Image (cartoon, grey):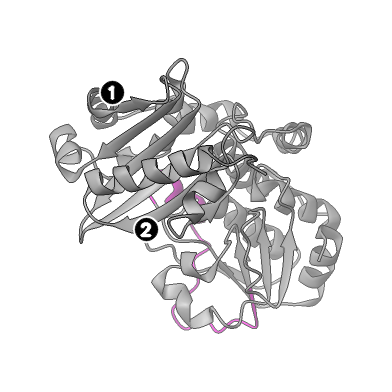
Amino acid sequence: MNYQEAAEFLKIHDNYLILTHKRPDGDTIGCAAGLCRALRTLGKTAYVLPSLDATTLLAGYLDGLAAPDDFTPDTVVSTDVATVNLLPDNALPFKDRIDLAIDHHPSQEFFAKETCLEADKAACGEIIWKICQELGVMDGDIATPLYVAIATDCGCFVYGNTTPHTHRAAAALMEQGIPFQALNKRHFRTKSVARMKLESLILQHMHLYHNGTVATVPISLGMMAEAGATSEDTDDVAAFLGQIEGVLHTATIREHEGGECRISVRTRADLLNATKVCARLGGGGHKAASGCTVKGTAAEAERAILAAIDEQLTQATQD
């Protein structure tokens, strides 16, 4: 289904429940909020399923949009969700009745009845923007979360996934009079003291391989405690190692309670396919940014992802 067909679908249905993915980022939250407000502008009944683990930084975009406990939807839509495995626990009752999935991940598993997929887009927010154009609805309340969706998924327009279309979408949203300067400062130029301490520890514990082109770091529970950091302080921490001169590929390993580690891989996609690296450990995502979850200590997870990187680097092609 293309974005025009998705817009037609949205016009003829009603009583919407919009789903985001667990450990939500700015793209899934921004898309859900923007789409929900757009549907309401059309006179539709629309809610977002409450996010169980949204950070304070992002939760505010869903204010006034949360579905009441007794809401029974007729139409279920997911935004920026590539697989049902990414649905939070409170979304699992709806996993077999998702009517439309709007997504930009090449690893999309087509779990919904209908799917609007544009894998060449840097952010799912770009697709929602196109759908809103087709629907003929846009204002500052819709544009603000969509701008956050786009800006956060392309690192404020510096990641390699940024395209001319990304800039055109962002420019159109800015024309709605949104506070883009404040949004960019909030999401990209403001850090807590705990985050700064954590970054210092990351530099102390990182490891460099392949002549300094591959950087890995295990962020243990002990490091988090030493920095006084919480999950609120780790937003986009996976991008930090990529700022080091000469580093092309990174793996950031976050240790969690229960013997689980979540790994974020960022690569220069023409030289190393992050999706294929993470697929070796049961994960997926984009060619330049992917993730996976493994059992074990942070050190064990680091060895596992480094082995996956080494194996993928030996492949003749990264396509």
The picture places residue 34, in percent across and down from the top left corner, at 64, 53
* In the image, residue 34 lies in the stretch drawn in magenta: no
Amino acid carrying mark 2 in the image: Asp
x 38%, y 35%: residue: 237
Q: Label 1 belongs to which residue?
A: 203
Residue at (38% x, 63% y) in the render? 52
Could you tell whether 63 is left or right of 11 in the image? left
Q: What stretch is highlighted in magenta?
A: 55-76
As rendered, which of 44 and 268 lies closer to the eye? 268
Q: Position of residue 2 (x, y in %)?
A: 83, 61
Quadrant housing the C terminus: top right
| Few, some or many residues within 10 Å of mark 2 (<14, 14–19, 20+) | some
Q: Are marks 2 and 1 in contact (CB under 8 Å)?
A: no
Q: Does the magenta stretch include residue 64?
A: yes
> Which residue is disc 2 drawn over?
53
2 or 1: tag closer to the N-terminus: 2
Q: Nearer the viewer, residue 228 or 111?
A: 111
SS class, disc 1? helix
Q: Quarter of the image holding residue 171?
A: top right
* Horizontal relation, residue 280 to residue 72: left or right: left
Above or below for 252 versus 31: above
Q: Place residue 317 in its image quadrant.
A: top right
Tell me where residue 215 sits by quadrant: top left
Percent coordinates x, y for residue 238 in the rendering: 41, 37
Foreground label between 2 and 1: 1
- When the figure is inspected, residue 269 is found, relative to residue 292, above or below; the finding is above
Q: Is residue 295 left or right of residue 96?
A: left
